Amino acid sequence: MAIKDYIRERFFPHMLCAGCGHGTVLNSLLRAIENLGLSKNDIVMVSGIGCSSRIAGYVDFHSLHTLHGRALAFATGVKMSRPELNLIVPMGDGDALAIGGNHFIHAARRNIDITAIVMNNRTYGMTGGQFSPLSGYGTLATTAPYTNIDHAFDTVELAKAAGATFVARTTTYHFQQITSILQKAIKHKGFSVVEVLSQCPTYFGRKNRKGSAVDMLEHYKKATTRVGSKAKKENPDLIERGVFVQKKLPEYCSEYDKIIERARKGQ
Ligand SMILES: Cc1ncc(C[n+]2csc(CCOP(=O)(O)OP(=O)(O)O)c2C)c(N)n1
Ligand code: SF4
């Protein structure tokens, strides 16, 4: 199948701003799905609300556009009733870790076989640039005109601590890495978290004087390094990219099937 066969062309042109990183994530995701040779009938994309969540409307999979922060709860319901399907949940940093933070940690703890993509642009893009739990101390936002005093979560550390069995991070500059990591994440049997640093030139970039979308991409190139690289030891401020966790643990739906079986047999 060609990439265009995975797209719902009737919903184009898309609503993303010029230079938004989320389009790159969509492009890289479709390439991952094409490389895996998945049938679009076997994929369910569940999203909440946000610029990132809008990508669910542009793919010709089964798609559910649900409530802000609740995509993982809906996805859990779908996965438990149809465990043979591939569940992919694209989220913004606000969607995943502010209003949806509780669903995020518990989906990770249960190890349910869902691929969660956190598009981290460090802001609430859709609603006009409010600060999010990933904006970071000292940044500017429409709701923090005198600087943000909240400290940021580290998505990777949070996902690891909550029990996710596949945890990775990359950026929109490294678009080929998005594809290769997403392929691994989708194939992984368990809860997989892929954080993608994705630029919002319109709000985070403008408020924080980060320049154009291209400048923001250049920043991702300079500010990140391969996981475990020598560069990180020399410069601890560098953000690591790559796969941090990939381990096997019992998956939630499989375990649930065993419980049903035991209940049927009365054991
Ligand atoms: C229950 C509820 N609260 C708040 C909103 C308003 N709202 C819509 S999107 C959004 C934040 C979007 O930010 P993020 O999830 O980071 O995605 P982005 O738009 O940056 O990609 C908010 C607060 C809503 N739709 N529903
Ligand atoms: S507001 Fe930001 S996140 Fe939303 S489409 Fe525009 S650039 Fe992307």
Image: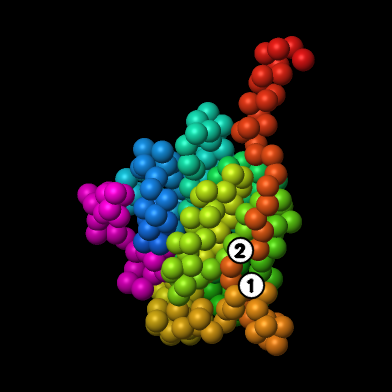
Residue at 45% across, 79% down: 217
| Image quadrant in which the C terminus is located | top right
Mark 2 nearby-residue class (10 Å; few <14, some 14–19, many ≥20): some
**Mark linked to residue 97:** none
Closer to us: 105 or 248: 248
Is the CB atom of the residue marked by disc 1 within 8 angstroms of ligand 1's nearest atom? no
Image position of 244 (left or right of 223): right
Image position of 41 (left or right of 177): left
As helix, strand or loop, the secondary structure at mark 1 comes to loop
Residue at 69% across, 71% down: 151
Residue 69, percent from left and from top: 55, 49
Callout 1–callout 2 Cβ contact below 8 Å: yes
Q: Can residue 145 be seen in this view?
A: no
Name the residue carrying label 2.
Answer: 243
225 is within the stretch colored magenta: no
Q: Earlier in the sequence, mark 1 or mark 2?
A: 1
Q: Which amino acid is tagged 2?
A: Val
Mark 1 nearby-residue class (10 Å; few <14, some 14–19, many ≥20): some
Q: Can residue 191 be seen in this view?
A: yes
As helix, strand or loop, the secondary structure at mark 2 comes to strand
Residue 155, percent from left and from top: 63, 62
Question: Label 1, label 2: how many angstroms apart (C-alpha)?
Answer: 7 Å
In the image, farthest residue toward the right: 267
Q: Give the range drawn in magenta.
A: 1-25
Name the residue carrying label 1.
Answer: 227
Above or below: residue 202 compared with residue 15: below
Residue 236, percent from left and from top: 70, 82
Above or below: residue 118 compared with residue 72: below
Q: Which amino acid is tagged 1?
A: Val
